[in-house]
Image (cartoon, rainbow, N blue to C red):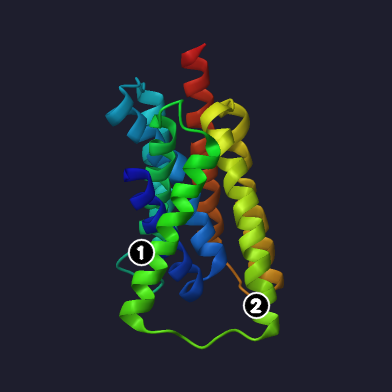
């Protein structure tokens, strides 16, 4: 249930964020998810984190602040939605890790998507049915569903049985594709502070991963 709630929160907030905020900015904030997962592992799973990893985690959140820039003219209220989505996805990953081995990846995936269907039904009942998509929109939705289900299944499997040092770095490639799409498709122009903040988040996340693997060894 906790995983399902986190799933819905992450997807709803992230979807709304990419609808109103620049894709490059939202994707950069999302890269902080492994840092939150590392903190959650300490709180919920009793993992030990040394001062170097704590320092790297703190630096990573400084990178988030570099992107958000609260209190300045560059601050976008919609970027807070990306932060909430990131926290939701971190909760989902932690709950996935804590799920009993007796549950298969298919079960976890079905429960997650079932909660999204329920949440969509509740939102429809509250807001009413919106305009139906045209042929192009329908094709885009079907493609998004297909890609989403395949990616979701692979992500769930990697979080449960994969080696963290191998699987987690691939998450950061999402930022590369998001930046390319944001610039080429949507005409976004991330400023220097966004680029620097994204680099700080990625580097701190990779260092945190490296230290955790070294400590485990």
Residue drawn where x is 54% and y is 37% of the image: 105
The earlier-in-sequence mark between 1 and 2 is: 1
Mark 1 surroundings: few (<14), some (14-19) or many (≥20) residues within 10 A? some
Pick whichever, 194 or 153, lies toward us.
153
User: Decide: marks 1, 2 in contact (CB < 8 A)?
Assistant: no
Q: What distance separates the C-alpha of mark 1 from that of mark 2?
A: 29 Å
- Residue neighbourhood size for the residue with mark 2, other residues' Cα within 10 Å, grouped as few (<14), some (14–19), many (≥20): few
Q: Residue at x 48, y 14 (%)?
A: 216
Q: Tell me the tag on residue 138.
A: 2
Asked whether the viewer can see residue 29, the reply is yes
160 relative to 79 in the view: left or right: right
Report whether 146 appears left or right of 50: right
Point out which mark residue 124 bears: none
Q: Which mark is residue 80?
A: 1
Is residue 76 depicted above or below 48 in this figure? below
Q: Nearer the viewer, residue 30 or 111?
A: 111
Q: Secondary structure at mark 2?
A: helix
Q: Quadrant for residue 2, please give it.
A: top left
Q: Give the percent coordinates (x, y) of residue 165.
A: 58, 27
Task: Classify residue 187 as left or right of residue 130.
Answer: right
Is residue 197 depicted above or below 144 in this figure? above
Q: Nearer the viewer, residue 125 or 192?
A: 125
């Amino acid at each position: 249930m906790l995983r399902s709630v986190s799933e819905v929160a992450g997807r709803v907030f992230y979807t709304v964020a990419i609808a109103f905020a620049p894709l490059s900015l939202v994707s950069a904030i999302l890269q902080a998810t492994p840092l939150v997962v590392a903190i959650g592992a300490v709180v919920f799973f009793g993992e030990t984190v040394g001062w170097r990893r704590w320092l790297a985690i703190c630096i990573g959140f400084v990178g988030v602040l570099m992107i958000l820039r609260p209190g300045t003219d560059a601050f976008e209220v919609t970027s807070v939605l990306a932060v909430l989505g990131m926290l939701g996805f971190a909760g989902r990953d932690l709950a996935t890790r804590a799920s009993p081995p007796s549950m298969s990846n298919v079960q976890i995936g079905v429960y997650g998507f079932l909660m999204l269907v329920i949440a969509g039904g509740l939102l429809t009942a509250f807001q009413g049915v919106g305009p139906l998509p045209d042929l192009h929109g329908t094709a885009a939705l079907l493609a998004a569903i297909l890609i989403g289900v395949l990616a979701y299944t692979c992500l769930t499997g990697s979080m449960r049985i994969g080696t963290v040092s191998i699987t987690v770095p691939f998450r950061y490639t999402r930022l590369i594709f998001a930046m390319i799409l944001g610039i080429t498709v949507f005409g976004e122009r991330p400023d220097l502070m966004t680029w620097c903040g994204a680099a700080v988040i990625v580097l701190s996340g990779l260092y945190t991963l490296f230290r955790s693997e070294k400590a485990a060894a």
